Amino acid sequence: MRLVRQLLSFGSVGMLATLAHVAVAYALLTATSINPYAANLAGFLSAVGISFVGNARVTFAYSEAWWPALARFAVVSLTSLGLTTAILAVVEARALPHWTYVLATLAIVPPLTFLLSKFWVFARRT
């Protein structure tokens, strides 16, 4: 039952982080003259912050030092970004329909991110 709760919480935090990413980027794009890539980076960073805090506190009830976990979380976040970019590159190189990118990303990235978060980022060290 604990695993089911963690999976549901992880999914909820992920959806909230995604919404924040899009909202921050969109708000910056429409209200300022910021470069679109800078707006997207700001959205990404807000999503990473929400995701880290939400998963640390709610999903995994992490109570140890946050700086080492934050460093590990940054590695996982950048790995996820690289993986989604690689999936997109394969889809583009093979001229596959873009929905295959969405399906492949959803099938690979969230499960991998969950496992890395559970067993590495927020694993009990004591």
Image (cartoon, grey):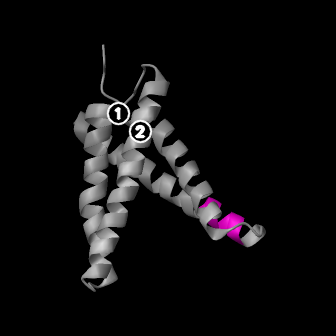
Which element type, helix, strand or loop, lies under badge 1? helix
- The magenta stretch spans residue 3: no
Residue at 28% x, 86% y is: 95
- The magenta stretch spans residue 27: yes
- Where is residue 93 drawn, in percent x and y? 28, 80
Residues marked 2 and 1 touching at CB (< 8 Å): yes
Quick check: 4 above or below 89? Answer: above
> Foreground residue, 59 or 67?
67
Residue at 49% x, 26% y is: 67
Quick check: 67 above or below 116? Answer: above
Is the magenta region chiefly helix, strand or loop?
helix
Write the start and end of the magenta stretch as one range. 23-29
Residue at 43% x, 21% y is: 63
Residue indicated by mark 1 = 121
Residue indicated by mark 2 = 73
Q: Residues within 10 Å of mark 1 (few under 14, many from 20)?
A: many
Kind of residue at badge 1: Val
> Foreground residue, 57 or 32?
32
Kind of residue at badge 2: Phe
Q: How many marks?
A: 2
Residue at 41% x, 38% y is: 73
Quick check: 110 above or below 63? Answer: below
Q: Residues within 10 Å of mark 2 (few under 14, many from 20)?
A: many
In the rendered image, the residue lying farthest to the top is 126
> Foreground residue, 34 or 21?
34
2 or 1: tag closer to the N-terminus: 2
Quick check: 22 above or below 89? Answer: above
